[in-house]
Amino acid sequence: MTDSGAADTASAEFALASVGKFSHLQLSDLITAVGYLPIGLSITDSDVRISYWNDAFLKILDLPEDLLLGHRSIADVFRYNAARGEYGPGDIEEMVNARIALVMRFEAHEFIRPSKGGRVIRVSGRPILGADGQPIGIVSLYQDITVEKTYERNLEARNLDLEAVLLNLSQTQSKLIQSEKLASVGQLAAGVAHEINTPIGFVQSNLGSLEGYVGGMFRLLDAYEALEQQVSSQPELLVKARELKREIDLAFLREDVPALVRESRDGLTRVGQIVQALREFSQVDASGGLQQWDVNRSLQAAISLCPASLLERAKLVTDLQPLPLIECMPGQLNHVFLSLLTNAFQAIDKPPGTVTVRSRELPNGICIEIADTGTGIAPENLKKLFDPFFTTKPVGQGAGLGLSLAYGILRSQGGQIEVQSEPGQGATFRVVLPQSARGAAAE
């Protein structure tokens, strides 16, 4: 403790004596001990004059020693701090008066305030009561907790980093699970395509044979009808034959049987297209290898696999321009386009709407656009659209991973995806893919 710290030892002894019952020797020892404390201490009397302080008080508050000489008012300390910007901008006297008013309440208090020098100080105070129980001053403690606060900030930053890592791990796990599901779906699709293709083959063959047989039968019937005109010896047989023709409605059969065969062939052709789409879609890319690919094939496969219930919601318009082969992972792109198409059809809340699929060549790659005339996307949702688990669909109707996975797949292949939308004006998703994903895949 400096000599100036003992400027009013009697006042200090009186104040400390008011806190507890000490002998004169005990008070002297206590004052000496307080002088060596690393925590700042000051005693302010009822006239708000600083009657006692220790060295740590000056050091922590960075006050010049002569500021407290002569039993100075604590207002001088407040004014000094305000003048050097410790309390921020504002009228100095107003800030001083506000702090004096708080001190004169002589109430217990504790708060933390930053110092202009970057330090953080904890201030706590307790009133000193006289014999009549009325406050006669206040004792205040000042502790520099800059290091502790730095540790806290560092710990909070570490916690935020850990939370980000955990979130990233959770997202990665979800994507891996979804990728495994997609791979399983692809393998299942390949198996289904193989299994369906075999019966389609023999049904197509049987229909071809049946068509030939029916044609022969009709030619035979033509011959019998020609003979019918010449039969006269057994009129009863002629009558029965004509009754049978009317009964089976031979004229209708001549028109309907070929039509049924044609419709059956058309149906099998459609099944064949679906099987081909499944084959295209089942490109699992298990080896992670890149292929030279016409992305229009992926678009056509995705269109073929759209459920009829979705296709009934809107008119599908395609404008697929010839595309150059690009180096990519087709199986992953198939999933992206099917997801975007599904979302586009589901966005049509009031059929009939329109879903438009366009493709075109760019100088260094290709561009795919999938647009709908649906409800559009709210501005506040646009930035969150590709976040994992974000969805505007009702609970149970979407996990919020489709667009996030699409974004990740396209980025992994060096591509980009962006969306343009306004509420009530539909949405357009634009996918841009480079000529080669080799550099992106290597990363």
Image: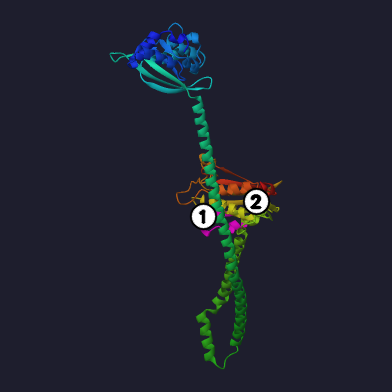
Which residue is disc 1 drawn over?
313
Q: Is the residue marked by circle 2 packed among few (<14), some (14-19), or many (20+) residues within 10 Å?
A: many
Is residue 230 on the magenta stretch? no
Quick one: 404 or 141, which is closer to the camera? 141
Say which quarter of the image contains residue 219. bottom right
Which residue is disc 2 drawn over?
359
Q: Disc 2 and disc 1: Cα gap in Å?
A: 22 Å
Quick one: 192 or 303, which is closer to the camera? 192
Q: Is the residue marked by circle 1 packed among few (<14), some (14-19), or many (20+) residues within 10 Å?
A: some
User: Three-letter amino acid code at disc 2?
Assistant: Ser
Q: Residue at x 60, y 85 (%)?
A: 224
Rendering coords of residue 262 (x, y %):
59, 70
Q: Is residue 134 left or right of residue 65?
A: left
Quick one: 97 or 266, which is closer to the camera? 97
Rendering coords of residue 115 (x, y %):
50, 20
Is residue 312 on the magenta stretch? yes
Q: Which residues are magenta?
A: 300-316
Frontmost of labels 2 and 1 is 2
Vertical position of residue 135 compared to residue 285: above or below: above
Q: Residue at x 53, y 59 (%)?
A: 308
Residue 19 visible in rendering? yes
Vertical position of residue 47 compared to residue 388: above or below: above
User: Three-letter amino acid code at disc 1?
Assistant: Arg
First-in-chain label (2 vs 1): 1
Colour option used: rainbow
